[in-house]
Structures are given as structure tokens and as C-alpha cells.
Image (tube, rainbow, N blue to C red):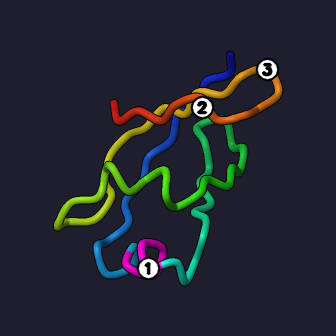
């Protein structure tokens, strides 16, 4: 398994474009400097009135297929 750590700070208004389907993915930069594209739908469970804010860990399998996304 691969683990990628990153911070997100997306306001509610900005995330609305992703939530409504206007933009289908969010690009993040990990602590190691890798750029990852994550489907916006994977972030919906973390959306609050403030937006999506916090530290996250993305876990993938050896083929880099999504396994889980956790807020730390």
C-alpha cells in the first residue's frame, strides 16, 4: 500500500463548483511534492459549511488505485 499525506483548504464556495459537477477533480500536492488528482466526489464526506479543510492521508494499492481517504 502507498500512503500520501497532504493539507487541503478549499472554501465552501470554491468547492461548490466541484460538488455540482462543474469540475470533476481536485489536484493536490503531497508532502513529498507529488501532484495527485483526486475525484471531487471522494472529498464530499469531508465538506462542511467552512469547506474542505484539514490534513488528509490517501491510501492506494500497489497499482495506485484508490483504497481510502482519511482526515487526520
In the image, farthest residue toward the left: 49
Tell me which corner region of the image, top left, top right, bottom left or bottom right, holds residue 63. top right
Quickly name the residue at label 3: 62
Tell me which corner region of the image, top left, top right, bottom left or bottom right, holds residue 53. bottom left
Q: Is residue 71 left or right of residue 5?
A: left
Q: In this view, does 34 lie above or below 51?
A: above
**Residue depicted at x 35% and y 36%:** 71
The stretch of residues the image draws in magenta is 16-20
**Residue depicted at x 71% and y 51%:** 35
Quickly name the residue at label 1: 20
Q: Nearer the viewer, mark 3 or mark 2?
A: 3
Q: Residue 16, how many percent across, how many down?
A: 37, 78
Q: In this view, does 3 lie above or below 33?
A: above
Q: Is residue 45 above or below residue 63?
A: below
Q: Residue 68, how many percent across, how many down?
A: 52, 31
Most common SS among magenta residues: helix
Seen from the viewer's position, the closer of residues 33 and 36 is 36
Q: Residue 9, how many percent across, how many down?
A: 37, 60
Q: What element carries label 3?
A: loop
Seen from the viewer's position, the closer of residues 68 and 5 is 68
Q: How far apart are marks 2 and 1 (CA)?
A: 26 Å
Q: Which of marks 2 and 1 is in front?
A: 1
Q: Residues within 10 Å of mark 1 (few under 14, many from 20)?
A: few
Amino acid at each position: 500500500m502507498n500512503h500520501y499525506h497532504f493539507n487541503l483548504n478549499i472554501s465552501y464556495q470554491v468547492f461548490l463548483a466541484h460538488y455540482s459537477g462543474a469540475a470533476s477533480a481536485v489536484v493536490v500536492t503531497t508532502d513529498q511534492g507529488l501532484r495527485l488528482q483526486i475525484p471531487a466526489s471522494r472529498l464530499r464526506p469531508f465538506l462542511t459549511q467552512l469547506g474542505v479543510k484539514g490534513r488528509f492521508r490517501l491510501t492506494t494499492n500497489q497499482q495506485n488505485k484508490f483504497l481510502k481517504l482519511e482526515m487526520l
